[in-house]
Image (tube, rainbow, N blue to C red):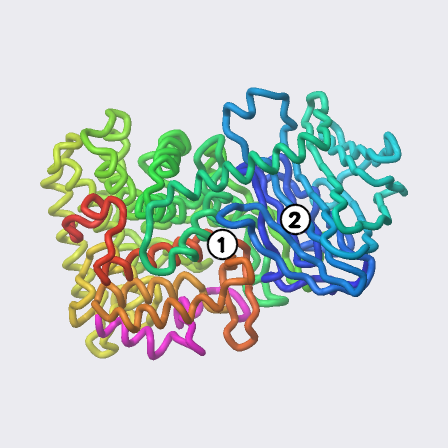
């Protein structure tokens, strides 16, 4: 089945999942990324990062074809249509999404990947290739054919079971099948996973019933979205994507589904994003609140209280799905990387950095959540916020590594100082609103000191812009967040000038670069997609809605054919770069859309609670 490039474009991948594990499916019907049992587990299929050693599971026509695909309405169930000279066939891919009641009614496999092939016209010859490669392609594998239709792959306590409605053949390290699909024929393929427990072998009827239940689950979930403003389809797709990046058992929200997809082909900017960044997750919680998805925000707050109990009041930038604070970084030297982009990393050394902006983003999100929930916050939550406010009061004058996690000595980043102000003002406001006890007077005093410092040293009259660092002369796209957190109004002359400078000096071919300063790494990168959405949101806040819409719509070119966005985009070549799908890109889309809606007078959920007293 070598009728495909070694590495399809990053944009060729769509995601399916069950809010515990995710699979990336290429446009040619190949599952090239699947980690089991959880988001951050070692890969079973990793061809995304090494086409020879990584492993995959492909079902596709054995003859030339043209492929198109879609999600089935407002769901995360993927349908790929293959059109050939011999006929037309569809491939439906999904992981079961069931209610708790449905899960209790029948025995369920720990994880399952279900694939359904249906003939639509003619008779199409098909091929299947199943090549599991556990533990990032290093694990010893026992591949056993149990029957003509069933194969088991064993490694220690881990077992996967492939059941097919067609006969298969197994060699030492892979299983293949050749079959035909005529109009009206329906074939089911089920890959289930067990870890130290008896396998649950499922029937064809189970596959069909689970498809209907999963369709209903996703439609019901999407139906809870209360947003009827501009770009609703894009907002709903982004919300569905963010739901797939939310780990249901704990409430953690990962930054992306993948590791080590490069920010420039062949470069070293390859990071593992399968962890919960406090910043990104706080942004996600606010985005969920803005479109009426309160339970998802509630789940994040619950995870937060658990995950940070060992480090609070100090916050690490990122945590594992279950709240571990240290995520050691190592390299998989045997993987060649996407198009030779090395190193391939597992874990992330940024977990040991000091990133002061996370305090502001977290307390800001917590306050908005508390306003939506109403009333006083619980004693343990109040103690948590008091601890953070005290920590910020003691340490905000120190340098840090900043929002972009640059691997340079710490500096006094302007955006980090602004977010220290944000943390203190929101903490003080929660006291003043009667939601908790605390030293609001002291926190307000410290917040004023931060604000005075930033306005004095974080703005360059010569450059006519806020600057990346205090006293510096470099631009940074994260400064577009200043009006979004209420530090300065968007129509403040200094902010308007900053927006214009970023538009003039950081924008290339319609896309905003993160910054114009050295960052300690070699090679370049694409444009960071969320920066364009921040620009659109800031323009909307400034009342420049036509420009905001133009920026938003220009950014949509970074979407692939099913509405997914990677971390970065190269407007010169039109290729996606970096890990995919990237939560921050989709959060930015929701944020910008809701800001445009507000600017145009369209009501959004909880508007009074989320945007009352913008500068707190």
Q: Position of residue 499 (x, y in %)?
A: 27, 71
Residue at (43, 57) in percent of width and height:
234
- Start-end of magenta stretch: 496-524
Numbered badge on residue 33: 2
Circles 1 and 2: CB atoms closer than 8 Å: no
Image: 321 above or below 346: above
Q: Is residue 190 above or below residue 58?
A: above
Counting from the top left corner in percent of width and height, residue 90 is at 69, 52
The structure residue drawn at horizontal position 55% and vertical position 65%, both measured from the top left corner, is 576
Q: Is residue 415 left or right of residue 175?
A: left
Which corner quadrant holds the N terminus? Answer: bottom right
Q: Secondary structure at mark 2?
A: strand
The residue beneath circle 1 is: 582
| 572 on left or right of 199 | left
Q: Is residue 588 visible?
A: no
User: Is 441 or 284 nearer to us in this picture?
Assistant: 284
């Amino acid at each position: 089945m070598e009728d495909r490039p070694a590495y399809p474009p990053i944009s060729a991948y769509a995601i399916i999942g069950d809010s515990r594990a995710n699979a990336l499916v290429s446009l040619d019907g190949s599952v090239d990324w699947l980690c089991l049992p959880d988001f951050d587990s070692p890969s079973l299929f990793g061809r995304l990062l090494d086409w020879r050693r990584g492993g995959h599971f492909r079902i596709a026509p054995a003859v030339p074809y043209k492929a198109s695909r879609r999600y089935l309405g407002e769901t995360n169930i993927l349908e790929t249509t293959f059109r050939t000279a011999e006929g037309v066939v569809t491939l439906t891919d999904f992981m079961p999404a069931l209610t708790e009641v449905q899960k209790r009614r029948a025995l369920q496999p720990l994880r399952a990947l279900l694939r359904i092939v249906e003939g639509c016209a003619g008779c199409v010859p098909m091929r299947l290739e199943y090549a599991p490669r556990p533990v990032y392609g290093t694990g010893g594998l026992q591949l056993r054919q149990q029957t003509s239709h069933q194969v088991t792959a064993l490694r220690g306590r881990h077992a996967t079971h492939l059941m097919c409605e067609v006969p298969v053949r197994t060699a030492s390290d892979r299983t293949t099948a050749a079959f035909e699909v005529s109009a009206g024929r329906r074939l089911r393929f089920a890959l289930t996973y067990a870890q130290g427990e008896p396998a649950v072998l499922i029937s064809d009827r189970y596959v069909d019933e689970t498809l209907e239940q999963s369709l209903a689950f996703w439609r019901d979930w999407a139906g809870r979205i209360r947003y009827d403003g501009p770009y609703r389809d894009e907002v709903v797709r982004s919300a569905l994507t963010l739901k797939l990046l939310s780990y249901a058992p704990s409430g953690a929200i990962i930054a992306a589904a993948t590791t080590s997809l490069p920010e420039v082909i062949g470069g070293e900017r390859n990071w593992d994003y399968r962890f919960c960044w406090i910043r990104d997750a706080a942004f996600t919680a606010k985005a969920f609140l803005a479109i009426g998805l309160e339970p998802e925000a509630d789940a994040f707050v619950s995870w937060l209280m658990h995950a940070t109990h060992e480090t609070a009041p100090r916050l690490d930038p990122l945590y594992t799905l279950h709240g571990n604070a240290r995520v050691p970084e190592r390299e998989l030297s045997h993987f060649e990387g996407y198009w030779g982009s090395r190193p391939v990393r597992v874990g992330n050394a940024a977990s040991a950095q000091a990133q002061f902006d996370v305090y502001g983003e977290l307390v800001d999100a917590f306050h908005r959540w508390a306003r939506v929930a109403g009333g006083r916050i619980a004693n343990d939550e109040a103690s948590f916020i008091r601890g953070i406010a005290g920590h910020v009061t003691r340490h905000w004058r120190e340098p840090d590594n900043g929002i972009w996690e640059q691997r340079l000595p710490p500096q006094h980043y302007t955006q980090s100082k602004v977010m220290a102000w944000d943390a203190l003002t929101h903490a003080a406001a929660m006291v003043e609103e009667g939601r908790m006890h605390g030293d609001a007077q002291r926190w307000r005093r410290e917040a004023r000191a931060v604000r005075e410092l930033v306005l004095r040293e974080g703005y360059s009259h010569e450059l006519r812009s806020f600057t990346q660092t205090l006293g510096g002369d470099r631009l940074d796209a994260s400064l577009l967040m200043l009006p979004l957190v209420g530090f300065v109004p968007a129509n403040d002359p200094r902010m308007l000038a900053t927006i214009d400078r970023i538009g003039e000096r950081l924008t290339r071919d319609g896309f905003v670069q993160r910054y114009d300063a050295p960052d300690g790494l070699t090679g370049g990168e694409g444009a960071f997609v969320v920066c364009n959405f921040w620009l659109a949101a800031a323009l909307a806040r400034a009342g420049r809605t036509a420009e905001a819409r133009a920026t938003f719509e220009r950014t949509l070119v970074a979407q692939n054919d099913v509405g997914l966005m990677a971390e970065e985009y190269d407007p010169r070549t039109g290729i996606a770069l970096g890990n995919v799908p990237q939560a921050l890109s989709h959060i930015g889309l929701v944020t910008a859309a809701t800001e445009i809606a507000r600017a145009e007078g369209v009501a959004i959920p909880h508007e009074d609670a989320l945007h009352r007293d913008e500068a707190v």
